[in-house]
Amino acid sequence: MNGEIIAFCCEHSAYAAADVVGKQGLHYPEKLRVIRVPCAGRVDIIHMLKALEEGAAAVLVLGCEDGLCQHLTGNVRAKERVKYSETLLTEVGIDGGRVGMFNLAANAPHKFIKIINEVNDRIKERERENDSR
Amino acid sequence: MPVRMGIFLCDCGGSLKNIDFPKVRENLENLEDIAFVDITHNLCLEEGEKAITSRILTENINRVVIAACSPEFRERNFGELLEKLRLNPGLLSLANIREQCSWAHEGDVTRKALELIMMAVGKARLLQPVERKEVAVNNEVLVVGGGFCGMKSSLELSQLGIRTTLVEREPTLGGKLKKLEGFYSSQIEAMIKAIEKAENIEILTSAEVTGVEGKIGDFKVRMRGTKEILRSFGAIVFATGYKTEVAAGDFPLKPGVNIISQERLVQLLQAPTLEARPETIGFIFDLSDENPRFPTLATLNNALAVKQRWGSEVYVFCKNVKVDSEGVEKLYREAREDGVMFLKFDKNPKISADDGRVKIDAEDTLLGEEIVLTCDLVVAEEKLLPAEGTEGLSSLLKIRTDSQGFYQEENVHLYPVSSERKGIFFVGNCRGDLDLGRVLADISSVVAKVYELLPPGKVIVEAERVKADPQKCVACLTCIRVCPHRAVQLVQVDSEKVVAEISQLACDKCGICAAICPAKAIKFEGYSDDQILAQIEAIGVS
Amino acid sequence: MIVAERKPIEEILQMIAPYKKVLLAGCGTCVTICWTGGEKEVGILASQLRLARGKEGDKADTVEATVERQCEKEMVEELRDKVDGVEAVLSLACGAGIQTIAEVFEDKPVFPAVNTTFLGSPEGEGVWLENCGACGDCFLDRTGGICPMVRCAKGILNGPCGGTRKGGKCEIDPDKDCGWVLIYRRLEKQGRLDLMRKYYPPKNFRVVKRPGKMQAIKA
């Protein structure tokens, strides 16, 4: 990998939202790679760490809005795992901001774009900081 | 058996112009386990189906990758096609090169398209077939609660040919209908007769549910009536209703002889003789902030009954008359024509005792004036609460209740009648404040769902889509505790070992158990750790 | 079961700093269940090490393996091929497992990645509470099945210290329950409160000789 953004997208929310983005002819950075999951709660810590090991710039988990997970606790568990991954990364000197959890609904294509763009901006900023050193 | 993969690339009628399809094909053909890479124009149309069919019938492939539009559209159709061609649909892997690639970016996206397809290829290599099998299910339904909702549900189920058992803890059917005036009460006699007449409805009165084990298709229910009963059902519908309580907290005076509940009013109305007919009756609601519909309905109904039976003067004090339910607008107009007076307040009125009667001191928002009324009888606002025993039942069933104690729907918007356990449903006011229109919709919805889930005889399930490996399972109970659908149970595999078993009928395939299992014993075919990691590893390799 | 917690990462990194190729060995029993040293945690720690070392430009060689019970010599023996190929072993098992693997592979440095903390039971999702002190002289018969040696912060054996806080919480640590309140309520439920009036002499800790040894009946 070379600086891609990996996004685990729950099929009920983010994956559907990403489809709507395409249908509406809206755009986002090409470096995004989406991995479809049945629920954000399927995503585990090792998936996020391995993605970073492979060279991803950032790993995101995108799930349903609070209280609206069809499987009740999937998005909550995912958030805990993302938080824990942040600590594991910080422990070994890796920027914990490279993993993140976001919530959105299937009818929110603009939120999807906003999230990806914000993450991308942060990545570019980090690259600039690293270059200037 | 070595993997032999067939790849279909769809250019969506030639419209995905920012992908260089021949280049993609060139890159893929070189891989050693790829049998062929075809570029097609419309995989979703008949020509596409023909293209897939002819290839699968002639080539000896055991994995299929399709790069086309979103799987949300096509996954099912392609899967069905593969099944027709005797290839297990579990061996299909899809790449979304349209909505999430060609349509989502400016400029040439050939590289990304190729990577997305490589991700699908990486996953496909590890896919295993998932067999579908028939399981026998018990398609008898238990309806708990013999009130309006329970009776109506039983009748509708029975009309679809579904054997139903209706259990009620009181000695007679009817529930709250027996205690309501007007519109609802006329229905009871007819409904009870219809139920008694129906051949496939069994009535159990003076009986209560004391335990439920098992899962959809096979719920083992313990009931206690005159004796202990143990029966098996395919699905359970709870219509356990509600109770009302005077919202005493908001009321400055204690309920007593002349501050009464709606139920008490109905008792008085239905009593054969009455000592003294109350001349002035005041109804009051909207004192708390909750604004449910129920008080409006009860008030209008009973106010009309008062006018008809006693001819008293009737005043209704409220913030808003909520007429957004079926038939209520009409009731409101009838009430006004009959002389019921409605007074709207903004600030809560002052209520005090006055020489054996009750004084209400309110500021009417329309007149802008203070109105003081002394009533013989005040019917106080009531809160709608879950029926007695709801809390006990819900912990027995291991289903959640919401913050007010009513049963919690699986998803308020999308699945309002289902609980989080497949096969257990709720209808009516045991879910919270509803009106007749929504209750009837609920009932039809439940009946349709039951019919869908438990067709006559057998159900086809994916055997072992999500499976706990008995060799690796250490029976730590985590998956059992964590499954939001209560689909996992402990079973004995031999004389010593107990392991977790996931019911394919009840499983909703979320993967939460697969992620959380500390021993990595649960494999979720299609989304296993290996299959996810294969997708990660395929990125950037092009 | 035995409960353990992962050591601070700096300690672990320091231990294995001189070694390039390391085997991370997990155990499939207690430490798997308490989320500390099973196959999953081996994978996560290995990934962390690779990320840490990758950053310093030193690609680490990490080998991962988990055996069913690391305190069984025969099961540990299965790792021989993997151990031969590495310079050191980082074990995520409890102290018993670590020492077993160290004994079987005597010539290899073996390091503990976890601290073995206590014997306990699950209290809620993901929470374990110590409830046994392995004193070798169990007297749960007199305390309604609750051990004051462990559940009482002061470890006293003849009733509460008198400093119990409101809500039945411990004087020393307000987050902990007062062990003796728990015992009282349990005995009350069973109608055996008379046991609390009996005096028991101080415990004989010499019963447990270190290291303890147990010979089961040879059947």
Image: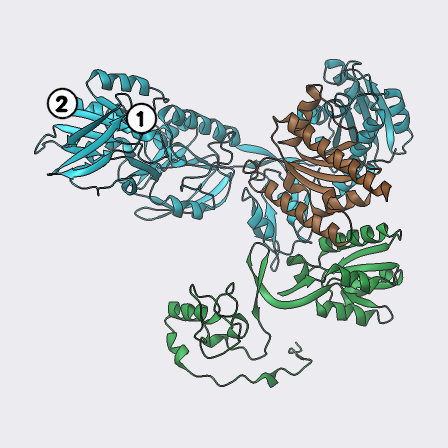
The tint chain B carries is: cyan
Residue B311 disc label? 2
What kind of residue is marked 1?
Answer: Ala
The colour applied to the residues of chain C in this rendering is: green
Q: Position of residue B112 (x, y in %)?
A: 82, 28
Q: Colour of chain A?
A: brown
Relative horizontal placement of residue B32, taking residue A52 as reference (left or right): right
Tell me the element at label 2.
Answer: loop
- Specify whether residue B296 is in view: yes
The CA distance from mark 2 to mark 1 is 35 Å
Q: Give the residue number, with chain letter if any, for mark 1.
A: B194
The quarter of the picture where residue A20 lies is top right
- Mark 2 belongs to chain: B
Apparent side of residue B157 relative to residue C12 in the rendered image (left or right):
left
Is B401 situated left or right of A38 in this image? left
* Residue at 81% over, 67% down: C110
Which chain hosts label 1?
A: B
Q: Residues within 10 Å of mark 2 (few under 14, many from 20)?
A: some
Quadrant housing the C terminus of chain A: top right
Q: Amino acid at mark 2?
A: Gly
- Residue A122: image quadrant is top right
- Residue at horizontal 86%, vertical 30%? B34
Place residue B323 in its image quadrant: top left
Q: Residue at x 58, y 58 (%)?
A: C127
